[in-house]
Amino acid sequence: MAVEEKHISSAVIRRLPRYYRYLGELLDSGVERISSNELSERMKVTASQIRQDLNNFGGFGQQGYGYNVEYLHKEISKILGIDTSHNMIIVGAGNLGQAIAGYADFEKRGFIVKGIFDINPELTGHSIRGINVKMFYEMEDFVKNNDIEIAALTIPKESAVEVANILVKAGIKAIWNFAHTDLNLPKDIIVENVHLSESLMRLSYNIASRNKDKK
Ligand code: NAI
């Protein structure tokens, strides 16, 4: 069965970027093949979990050989859709927007920042990694004319819904939403919400429960 025809659980999808990262590191250090047991030791995931996860995509492994690192890395990149590039814009050139725009490594994964937009005229002419900040009123046409698939929303939550609707009208396919609000967009628009504070709260929970165990 072709990968795209099969339903893959979101738990597996969540683990794939981590496999991708580890396999990338192995590739960089010249490792050509690896057994699920070795991968399991490095990743602190059980070998059976790894086999189960990768079996979703036809396995890729061979009995007695293990996994071909380069092949598996490439196949996972195809599954994650990062074997092709995606044009992206950032809306909101404040602290967070500028930090994301300044992080060149996203481009290695195929996410190409084509434009950065803000409503603050003082930011006109400001440039991040050679990308000039443009004014918000230019955004709609820019999305339409530059094959932009993804918009990162790094603006206050008060204007996020309105801006998201403009982006949808302009033909955006996906929103990487950092604003602390739900966007409720049409079903065909992919939304990935990112909340660093939630991650920090999980960390805090783990500190609290460890402290409780010690008492
Ligand atoms: P900031 O105040 O430094 O930047 C916000 C920028 O958005 C400003 O330059 C402002 O002029 C611009 N802006 C406001 N309304 C706009 C609109 N309608 N269109 C285009 N640009 C607009 O704030 P910061 O620190 O960069 O945070 C941005 C947002 O991200 C905030 O809502 C904050 O709560 C959120 N945030 C979310 C995190 C997460 O993990 N989800 C982490 C950090 C911040």
Image: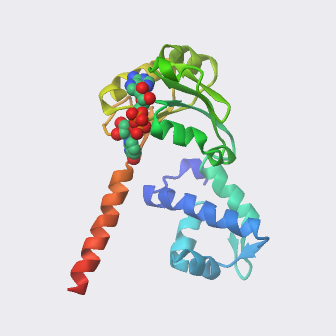
Residue 96, percent from left and from top: 46, 40
Up/down of 159 relative to 72, above or below:
above
In this rendering, the answer to whether 41 lies above or below 78 is: below
Q: Quadrant of the C terminus?
A: bottom left
Quarter of the rendered structure image containing ligand 1:
top left
- Between 83 and 206, the residue placed more toward the observer is 206
Q: Residue furthest front?
A: 122
Return the residue nearer the eye: 32 or 138. Answer: 138
Q: How is the image coloured?
A: rainbow
Q: Is residue 201 visible?
A: yes
Provide residue 186's location: percent of width, then percent of height: 38, 28
Specify the quadrant of the image occupied by residue 126: top right
Q: How many marks?
A: 0
Could you tell me which quadrant the N terminus lies in?
A: bottom right
Q: As displayed, is residue 25 above or below residue 88?
A: below
Q: Is residue 33 left or right of residue 214?
A: right
Q: Quadrant of residue 205?
A: bottom left
188 shown above or below 111: above
Q: Residue at x 60, y 60 (%)?
A: 57
Q: Nearer the viewer, residue 38 or 57?
A: 38
Where is residue 121 drawn, in percent x and y?
48, 17
Residue positioned most to the bottom: 215
Q: Is residue 97 left or right of residue 196?
A: right
Identified at 60% across, 41% down, the residue is: 102
- Residue at x 57% of width, y 78% of height: 40
Q: Please provide percent x and percent y for residue 190.
A: 46, 37
